Amino acid sequence: MQLLEHQAKQLLGRAGLSVPTGQVFTSAIDSAAPAFPAVAKSQVPVGGRGKLGGVRLVHNQAELQSTVREILSLKIKGHRPESVLVEQAVDITRELYLSLRINRDQRRIEYLTSPDGGIEIESAGSTIIIPHNNTNRIDTIATVLKLDLREVESLLADLERCFFDNDLLLLEINPLVVTAGSVLVCADAKILVDDNARFRQPHLPWHDETLLRPLGGTIGVIANGAGMAMSTMDTIYAAGGEPANFLDIGGGTGEDIFVTYLRQITELPGVTSIIINIFAGITRCDDIARGIIAASQQIPGLVPLFIRLEGTRQEEASDLLRATGIAIQPDLQTCVAKALEVRV
Ligand code: GDP
Ligand code: MN
């Protein structure tokens, strides 16, 4: 799981690292920033926000209002932020790069560091790698970053505590800044948590990553298996239609899955119908039918569903659906043809 910046900074702060004072905004309400000048930062799970207008300096309340509003409506690499982190701006003299990560190929944990941190890190070319158990790591990193030895010692101790205590795969600080007052501050952070550690890190903000990928068309798609989802999309394209999304529900059959996904697809702009294409092996058609029925009862304004449902317990499923007035189509082609006939 990747944490959002504000969540990552919370972990860093708890481990004793220095992070800017900040506040999370989910709408452009009338609360003040921690202090001006402030930096408003789009909370999307991708990097490169600075270059795409997702990190902006603001000087007063009016500017804060309009900037927060703009950032909330600005998509970055396909992600629309649910929140904006507003922090007291840091007075930067140098931007450094420091990360700690698990390198599976090398079977080790290692530091990556560079004195040329910031938004151009990809092209910096000055990054060096130091195994985490290297006894000279403190000296090496202090030399590379031109920092005080003591400072680096405590920085690495805090970083390692954060890394190990939280079962991280990656802890990246970019930039790690030296302020005008010569203080080290983590101005940005990217944290990846090992999903397998969920059971012992219950306090972390776990979220189930949605497998739904909006594509902008009018016909929603739910299929079991990525191949099924793609062939469903191909069939829609071949018939002259446009899929509204990609979604592979895998072996998922729970009622909550159907309610969640059918609601999310119905709410995508421009969607006029949804095709459900399931070929059940281990999955049972009657479970799927119950999910569809629950969704159709719970979602107001649900668009028409065109269902292809074949395989294990197909008869039971069609009995269940028929009893609630929901039809199963004879094949995918029929689903697509009918979906194309739906007009808003
Ligand atoms: P990213 O582009 O998604 O990695 O977002 P960052 O949080 O790393 O911000 C990008 C750049 O914005 C940084 O490299 C800094 O140059 C600048 N920046 C971010 N926060 C501050 C701040 O508090 N003060 C100043 N002066 N610049 C900042
Ligand atoms: Mn950054």
Image: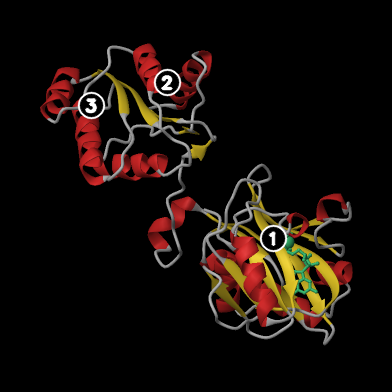
Between disc 3 and disc 2, the foreground one is 2
Identify the residue under disc 2. Answer: 340
Where on the picture, by quarter, is residue 184?
Answer: bottom right
Q: Is residue 133 above or below residue 34?
A: above
Mark pair 1, 3: CA separation: 45 Å
> Going 86% across and 50% down the picture, which residue do you hit?
123
Q: Could you tell which of marks 1 and 3 lies nearer the N-terminus? A: 1
Q: CB under 8 Å between callouts 1 and 3?
A: no
Q: Is residue 133 left or right of residue 235?
A: right
Towards the viewer: 68 or 110: 68
Q: Is residue 227 left or right of residue 22?
A: left
Mark pair 2, 1: CA separation: 38 Å
Q: x and y percent of residue 101 in the render? A: 66, 56
Q: Could you tell which of marks 2 and 1 lies nearer the N-terminus? A: 1
The disc labelled 3 sits on which kind of residue? Arg
Where on the picture, by quarter, is residue 295?
Answer: top left
Q: Is residue 143 left or right of residue 279?
A: right
Identify the residue under disc 3. Answer: 284
